[in-house]
Image (cartoon, helix red, strand yellow):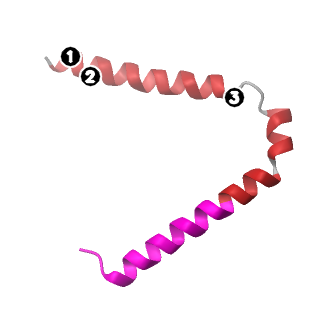
Amino acid sequence: MFSTGQWIFAALFLITFVIIMIFSYRKDINIHQTFYKGSYKVLIAFILFIVLLFIIKVTMKR
């Protein structure tokens, strides 16, 4: 399905992307703590909403 070169490229891209994201987050950590206090509540609400939709889907299927 995928060639060896494509797998190597995907792995290198993923590793590089993760490293850059970690570096960027570390660089902006003070800004995140100042402006995004309480943002975890939005994330939890979003996850609960997705779980609720999944539960509704499963119960309506039966």
Q: Residue at x 73, y 24 (%)?
A: 38
Instruction: Note whether 15 is above or below 32 in the view shown.
Output: below
Secondary element at image label 1: helix
Residues packed near mark 2 inside 10 Å, few (<14), some (14 to 19) or many (20 plus): few
User: Which dot marks residue 60?
Assistant: 1
Q: Is residue 21 above or below residue 52?
A: below
Q: Quadrant of residue 55?
A: top left
- Percent coordinates x, y for residue 8 in the rendering: 43, 78
Query: What's under tag 2, amino acid-wise?
Result: Lys
Disc marking residue 57: 2
Whether 49 is drawn above or below 2: the answer is above
**Quarter placement of the N terminus:** bottom left
* N-terminal label among 3 and 2: 3
* Residue 56 locus on image (x, y percent): 30, 17
Q: Which residue is mark 3?
A: 39
Image quarter in which the C terminus is found: top left
